[in-house]
Image (cartoon, rainbow, N blue to C red):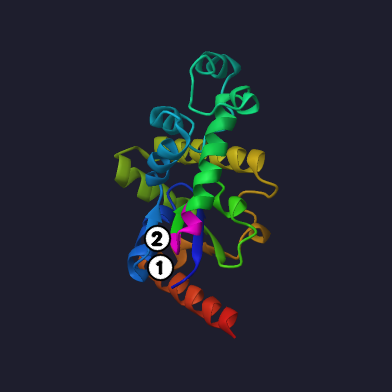
Amino acid sequence: MNSVVTVGREFGSGGREIAKRLAEKFGIRFFDRELLTRAAKDSGLCEEVLQNHDEVPTSSFLYNLVMDTYSFGYNSSAYVDMPVSHRVFLAQFETIKKIAEEGPCVIVGRCADYALADRDDLISLFIAGRADFKINRVMEKYNLTETKARDMIMKKDKQRKTYYDYYSSKKWGHVDTYDLSINSSVLGIDGTVELIAQYISDVEKARAK
């Protein structure tokens, strides 16, 4: 496998698990929160700051103002003058590009498909799921009631959508934003992994012609 694969996902759809298993299946690198550690190292930003702003819409003016009193390693005045949330996005954006240059990988979320849109080897995926499927997964994983699981899903997806729509030129979750969108609740996690793996193989064969 010689593609760079990005995976957008609805909360509870199993998108992270599917992405990780795809990486394992093809024997390539996997980046989810691992990307934050790498971005912190590359940019000089504190990893805690990256974690606090991870796929979260632009934070409050007050928080940005407080955090902007610290030094984050970049010296250019334009960079220093940016709100911390913008600096975090920029750090992730640059790290995503570096990671892709290093070879095949699977990257979860963080507008990676937008950051890598100009690459010929990009395959962008979006994993969705039925409400009952997602609610049951979240209830089991986090030991929540149905109501709390439903609220958590709505909150997380709203954050991801707002973040993606703010920083990219496309729309989160819209079919025309991605190469392939899949409802994981139809085939389950195993079946979805196999279907995507076959899709990737077919795309690479078509590109090689």
Start and end of the magenta stretch? 99-105
Q: Kindly check if marks 1 and 2 are in contact, taking CB atoms under 8 A apart as contact.
A: yes
Q: Which label is found at residue 17?
A: none
What residue did someone put label 2 on? Answer: 18
Which corner quadrant holds the N terminus? bottom left
Task: Pick the residue in front: 155 or 203.
Answer: 203
- Do we see residue 124 in this rendering? yes
- Do we see residue 129 in this rendering? no
Q: Residues within 10 Å of mark 1 (few under 14, many from 20)?
A: many
Task: Pick the residue in front: 206 or 91.
Answer: 91
Q: Amino acid at mark 1?
A: Val
Q: Secondary structure at mark 1?
A: helix
Name the residue rendered at 34%, 69% in the picture: 25
What residue did someone put label 1 on? Answer: 193
Name the residue rendered at 63%, 23% in the picture: 77
**Residue at the bottom extreme, as displayed:** 209
Picture coordinates of residue 40, whole percent (x, y): 42, 36
Q: Amino acid at mark 2?
A: Ile
Q: Is residue 103 above or below residue 40?
A: below
Q: Earlier in the sequence, mark 1 or mark 2?
A: 2
Task: Pick the residue in front: 145 or 3.
Answer: 3
Task: Pick the residue in front: 43 or 23.
Answer: 43
Please check the rendered image and state whether residue 100 is part of the magenta-colored stretch, yes or no. yes
